[in-house]
Image: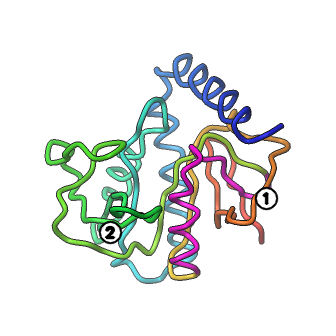
């Protein structure tokens, strides 16, 4: 199956799950938050790290709740949100103080004011689907793939989403980069 057909199927699957599980969103966010926090503690002894999230579009897992939970777990964490770098397929990251009322409309979603650019140590990454090998199916623009390639080992990528988004078979392109981790409501995927 080609990626465009997979995207249609994955969007529908995620939408159905999201609609049918609205009452569980806080529970799901809390579970994923705990697992993400465990990963961060395992891989980083530095408590003063910047974690990039994203402002959800459509029926993506609401990362803002996860960022708020992470701040409760460790108040030394700082946060950022991605902004599409003009005329490129790259993302820049700008400080986000967890106040959604300060966000402005961006190209695809809400973004923080373009004031203080940062390089996140941890990137929380959305997806339409994912594989056991931690490859993600995105929207097709390549923004995260190109950004992850640019950051290399300077940032740890953690995809966050739902179990139902797992795809058994997906074509992998040359520019596709596996995430370091994928966390769902019931499992952590990592190549140890």
- In the image, residue 111 sits, relative to residue 25, either above or below, namely below
All told, the count of numbered labels is: 2
Q: Give the residue drawn at x 20%, y 47%.
A: 103
Residue stretch in magenta: 132-152
Q: Give the residue drawn at x 36%, y 67%.
A: 92
Lateral position of residue 102 relative to residue 163, left or right: left
Q: Residue 145: x, y in percent?
A: 58, 63
Residue 192 in magenta stretch: no
Secondary structure beneath dot 1 equals loop
Check if mark 2's residue and mark 1's residue have beta carbons within 8 Å: no
Figure colour scheme: rainbow
- In the image, residue 109 sits, relative to residue 73, either above or below, namely above
Q: Residue 32: x, y in percent?
A: 53, 47
Q: What numbered label is drawn on residue 82?
A: none
Q: What numbered label is drawn on residue 133?
A: 1
Picture quarter containing residue 81?
bottom left
* Closer to the camera in the image, 46 or 145: 145
Q: Residue 80: x, y in percent?
A: 31, 62
Lateral position of residue 190 relative to residue 118, left or right: right
Q: What numbered label is drawn on residue 77?
A: 2
Residue 143 in magenta stretch: yes
């Amino acid at each position: 199956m080609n990626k465009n057909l997979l995207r249609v199927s994955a969007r529908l699957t995620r939408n159905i799950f999201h609609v049918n599980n609205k009452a569980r969103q806080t529970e799901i966010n809390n579970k994923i938050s705990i697992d993400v926090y465990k990963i961060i503690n395992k891989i980083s002894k530095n408590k003063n790290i910047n974690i990039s999230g994203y402002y959800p579009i459509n029926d993506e897992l609401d990362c803002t709740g996860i960022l708020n939970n992470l701040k409760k777990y460790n108040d030394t964490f700082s946060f950022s949100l991605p902004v599409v770098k003009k005329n490129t397929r790259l993302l820049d990251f700008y400080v986000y103080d967890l106040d959604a009322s300060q966000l402005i409309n961006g190209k695809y979603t809400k973004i923080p004011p373009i004031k203080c650019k940062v390089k996140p140590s941890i990137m929380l990454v959305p997806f339409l689907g994912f594989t056991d090998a931690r490859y993600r199916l995105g929207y097709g623009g390549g923004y995260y793939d190109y950004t992850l390639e640019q950051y290399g080992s300077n940032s740890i990528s953690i995809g966050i989403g739902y179990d139902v988004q797992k795809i058994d078979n997906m074509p992998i392109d040359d520019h596709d980069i596996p995430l370091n981790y994928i966390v769902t409501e019931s499992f952590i995927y990592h190549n140890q």
